[in-house]
């Protein structure tokens, strides 16, 4: 079975998923693409040997569609694909708010189609290893997490996503558009969230677009996390995540990128460190992920999120990270915004 794939949106993130598809082990072919920018659509189509077509025409000829447009279009396009019974891979954030995200989940689940969300940190070996470490009984309780994420504002450089400063298309700024990844992986590591507080700044002067966000997150377990998300103008600095986790009897320090390092130490044991591809191989050895999904990236390796999606289409699903998995992160992000908009009041979930 050759899976016929289409792309709705052919910008930066579509190119990223095209690269994952090029390294996928499941038989597929990109047959159609659509983008409001017809020249960009034609360039993408020529690159993959597909046709640049209208939305409706695309949905007529595909088995699976990647929704990689600006955020405000996700709900409409996911609903249209689900109505046709096509499998859907939708980029994060799913929608401008939790209510819209819930409607998207309802639509795909009613259709019975395979669906997956692009919360890519769960496929990065450093986070997979960190999750295993904190779940080891030797670690004890998670006490606190310090999470800093910085990136140059993505309206410039290789991103070139000018829509990310238009609230009508993106909703909000760095917390929703970028750090929903971070919020997702924090609750994946530490469990359900009890309450949050937040503070925002709009340093670049784009109204409604936060470019500095600081959140305090309290988990049901009693653990606390601080999240700092920054959009700056240092275009020579790559996007970076620095994370520290403190448990009763475990310390973890990591760079949350496929080429990064992770250092850890349990009480009474020597410090250990792995870097780059060695982290991925450790995850394979401990059955955190499959060697079949391993893909090399500059300086390291990660696990291909597209393999699982395509594989689920072949087998009839479900995919390992369906759209429903993004709802907790959406609820947490909405609560942080509510807190910040309310002068830092505590918001309980």
Image (cartoon, helix red, strand yellow):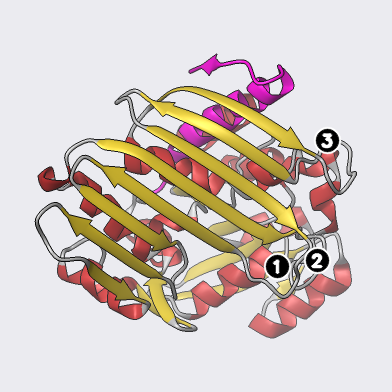
**Up-down relation of residue 114 to residue 331 (above or below):** below
Label 2 vs label 3: CA separation?
A: 19 Å
What label does residue 208 carry, if any?
Answer: 3
What label does residue 12 carry, if any?
Answer: 1
- Comparing labels 1 and 2, the label whose residue is closer to the camera: 2
**Residue pictured at 31% horizontal, 36% vertical:** 143
User: Is residue 341 inside the magenta stretch?
Assistant: yes
User: Is residue 120 inside the magenta stretch?
Assistant: no
Q: Residues within 10 Å of mark 1 (few under 14, many from 20)?
A: some
Q: Position of residue 204 (x, y in %)?
A: 86, 49
User: Toward the viewer: 64 or 255?
Assistant: 255
Residue under label 2: 160
User: Toward the viewer: 281 or 190?
Assistant: 190
Contact (Cβ within 8 Å) of mark 1 with mark 3: no
Whichever of callouts 1 and 3 sits on the residue coming sooner in the sequence is 1
**Residue pictured at 80% horizontal, 66% vertical:** 160
Whichever of callouts 1 and 2 sits on the residue coming sooner in the sequence is 1
**Up-down relation of residue 64 to residue 280 (above or below):** above
Q: Could you tell me which quadrant the N terminus lies in?
A: bottom left
Q: Main secondary structure of the magenta part?
A: helix
Contact (Cβ within 8 Å) of mark 1 with mark 2: yes
**Residue pictured at 17% horizontal, 39% vertical:** 140
Q: Which residues are magenta?
A: 321-349
């Amino acid at each position: 079975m050759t899976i016929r794939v289409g792309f709705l949106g052919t910008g930066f993130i579509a190119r990223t998923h095209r690269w994952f598809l090029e390294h996928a082990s499941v038989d597929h072919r990109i047959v159609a693409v659509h983008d409001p920018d017809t020249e960009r659509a034609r360039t993408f189509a020529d690159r993959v040997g597909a046709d640049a077509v209208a939305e409706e025409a695309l949905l007529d000829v595909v088995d699976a569609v990647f929704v990689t447009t600006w955020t405000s279009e996700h709900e409409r396009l996911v609903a249209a694909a689900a109505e046709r019974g096509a499998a859907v891979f939708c980029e994060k954030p799913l929608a401008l708010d939790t209510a819209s995200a819930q409607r998207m989940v309802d639509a795909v689940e009613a259709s019975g189609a395979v669906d997956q969300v692009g919360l890519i940190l769960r496929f990065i070996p450093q986070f997979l290893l960190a999750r295993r470490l904190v779940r080891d009984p030797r670690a004890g309780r998670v006490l606190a997490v310090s999470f800093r994420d910085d990136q140059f504002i993505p309206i410039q450089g290789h991103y070139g996503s000018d829509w990310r400063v238009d609230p009508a298309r993106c909703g909000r700024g760095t917390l929703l558009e970028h750090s929903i990844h971070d919020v997702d992986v924090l609750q994946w590591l530490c469990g359900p969230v009890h309450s949050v507080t937040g503070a925002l700044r709009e340093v670049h002067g784009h109204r409604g677009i936060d470019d500095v966000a600081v959140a305090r997150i309290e988990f049901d377990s009693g653990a606390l996390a601080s999240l700092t998300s920054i959009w700056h103008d240092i275009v020579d600095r790559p996007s970076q995540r620095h994370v520290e986790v403190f448990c009763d009897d475990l310390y973890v320090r990591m760079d949350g990128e496929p080429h990064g390092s992770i250092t850890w130490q349990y009480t009474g044991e020597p410090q250990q460190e792995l870097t780059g591809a060695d982290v991925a191989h450790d995850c394979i050895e401990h059955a955190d992920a499959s060697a079949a999904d391993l893909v090399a990236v500059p300086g390291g390796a990660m696990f291909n999120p597209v393999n699982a999606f395509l594989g689920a289409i072949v087998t009839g699903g479900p995919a390992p990270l369906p759209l429903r998995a993004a709802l907790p992160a959406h609820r947490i992000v909405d609560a942080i915004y509510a807190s910040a908009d309310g002068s830092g009041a505590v918001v309980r979930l």
